[in-house]
Image (tube, coloured by chain):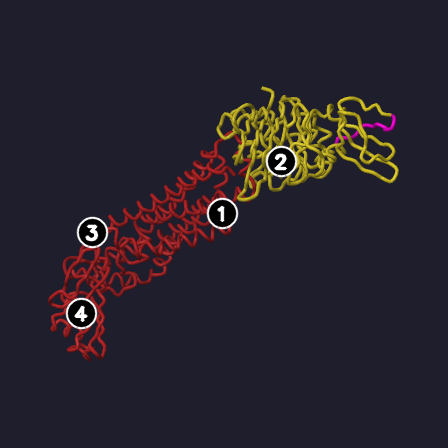
Chain colours: A red, B yellow
Amino acid sequence: MTWLTWRQFRPQTAAALAALAAFAVLLAVTGPHLASLYQTDGVTGCRGAGCGQAANNFLSDAGRYQVVYALGVAVIVLAPAIIGLFWGAPLITREFETGTFRLAWTQTITRTRWLATKLALAGLAAIGVSLGFSLTFGWWTAPIGQAARLATDSSFPLGMGPFSLLAFDAHGIVPVGYAAFAFTLGVTVGLLLRRTIPAMALTLAIFAAAQVAMPLAVRPHLFPAEHTTVAVGSVDATAHVSGNGSFSLGVRELAGQPGAWVLSAQAVNAAGQPVSSVPACAGQAQHTQSCLASQGVQIGVTYQPTTRYWAIQWTETAIYLVIALALAGFCFWRLNLRRS
Amino acid sequence: MTEVIETAGLGKRYRDVWALSDCTLSVPAGHVVGLVGPNGAGKTTLLSLASGLLAPSTGTISVLGGPPPTGPAQLARVGFLAQDAPVYAGLSIAEHLKLGARLNPRWDAGLARARISRLDVDPRRKAGKLSGGQRAQVALTLAIAKRPELLILDEPVASLDPLARRQFLQDLMEAASEQELSVVLSSHLIGDMERVCDYLIVLVASRVRAAGPVDDLLATHHLLTGPRQDPPRLPAGVRVISASHTDRQSTLLVHATEPVLNPAWTVSGVGLEDMALAYMRQDAPLSRDHHHLGVCK
């Protein structure tokens, strides 16, 4: 069965390896220059306050590789969807559509073993490919990630924090979880719908929904968020005040917590009560922050500290892997339940 | 063991539709059994149940004295050739043989090679580029080289042209006698069945209308022609399967275990196809008296 599965899966494996090789070549060609910029801009071996400026310079210089960075993120974020659509969904539907399941299931092999071999081989390939993409990209972006933590200016496009939406999805171990989930999701939907095109469409819809729901609804709550109250002006924040004194505050980054994931920021008064309007500051468009500070306004921030980055990465990956295993289990159950 | 397939009250439902219901029949071993019937009689469903591809909704079915094949032991004993002979279009003939060798412990590589070499096609040819006849032969080779005790074929020749059809059936017959296989094949082409089968089962709407060795069936069915009699008066033991009348003449297809000795009737033999077609008519009576018959209430 291993041979047959491998023989059937050969074109997909070849395509994946070609894509991985092209990706690796692109990164191998540009990576060394990026690393040398990191050195010449003085981030390597910097000390104290000099680091911030050196990192700023590097992020500015590295801006020329913004396209490569964006491409890498796009490839890694889209790869699981492609795996789910083009590996997962057709894995079983193709056998149904061509009738070859009748050939396969009447050889001297149980359909449990038939599915197990398919799932194991293609699933491991999916995990391997996504791991390959993630590792090569992680190697390439390492200087950017370090500089982003040191930089004092957070306005560089490449300086986004590790928790920012696409950056988190494209780094570390989570792409493996996404790929395993997308693959088994495609197989499961295919087993239920038995037709390739509808299965691909439904797989894409469910996977996209999961990828939106995870960072918005689940990831912030994987670990209890930290709370802190900071003075206005002590953090990298934006503040806008309108004519009647009502204002809005946004916190970009916490002082002393580079890269921390700010979940929410709320202006509070000295007593800790939320405030949304300070009439005394009406019209103080130029000096909003100092005015607010003088009125005793502080900012209550909930956030996930950077130190939790890998804990959140592994937890999220584990969640996706457990879902993938559950889907695979369902496939086995379903395949033997009502024999086709 | 004398029965390769035995069912009792067997039924299969798809949502609200019964593809097969309350089917009771037995298929004896050591024969090439033709399962004939109109489209929708339940032939494909019955054979899919026998090959283990489907699980019954009601009733029981035993295959070679055991459960329908789902585990390795039973799977090895039953060969199955599905309708339209599905093969992997992207795999070559040689790769199909490799597939068979890897998935079947009792695989007969020599037999498979010999059969394919007779096909006179390059084994490196992709199965998707074969003619219908060649594809059916590749699929049949897979099923036979597996060395099963029972070979089930679902409409194996339906999509073949007459020449390929004849070749395929001849080939099947040779294999069946060489390998001492029990064979069950379904078809709605009764003419083909006549050529290869020595046992016939007529299935109409899940019910067995007639069943028995072809020789017995031919010996016990007669065509009677004579002056118009409607309804006809016949001796006891003679059962009318179908009757047609003109102004002057009546033609009856009857089942009779004893010779019909009545000067009013001219008795002549009846072909298998005419006999089967007569049974397929909706108003044909249910057969009750044959030894191998499924008694279907």
> Label 2's element?
loop
**In what element is the residue under mark 1?**
helix
**Front in this rendered view, residue B24 or B201:** B24
> Mark number for residue A193?
1
The spot of residue B49 in percent (x, y) is 56, 33
Front position among marks 3 and 1? 1
Circle 2: residue type: Ser
Q: As rendered, which of A63 and A84 lies closer to the eye?
A: A84
CA gap, disc 2 and disc 1: 29 Å
Q: CA distance from mark 2 to mark 3?
A: 69 Å
- Subunit of label 4: A
User: In this rendering, which labeled residue sits more in front, label 2 or label 1?
Assistant: 2
Residue at 68 percent of width and 32 percent of height? B286
Write the start and end of the magenta stretch as one range.
B263-272
Total marks placed? 4
Q: What's the chain of the residue with tag 2?
A: B
**Residue A102 is drawn in which quadrant?**
top right
* Residue underneath mark 2: B206
Q: Quadrant of residue B245?
A: top right
Q: Which mark is residue A275?
A: 4
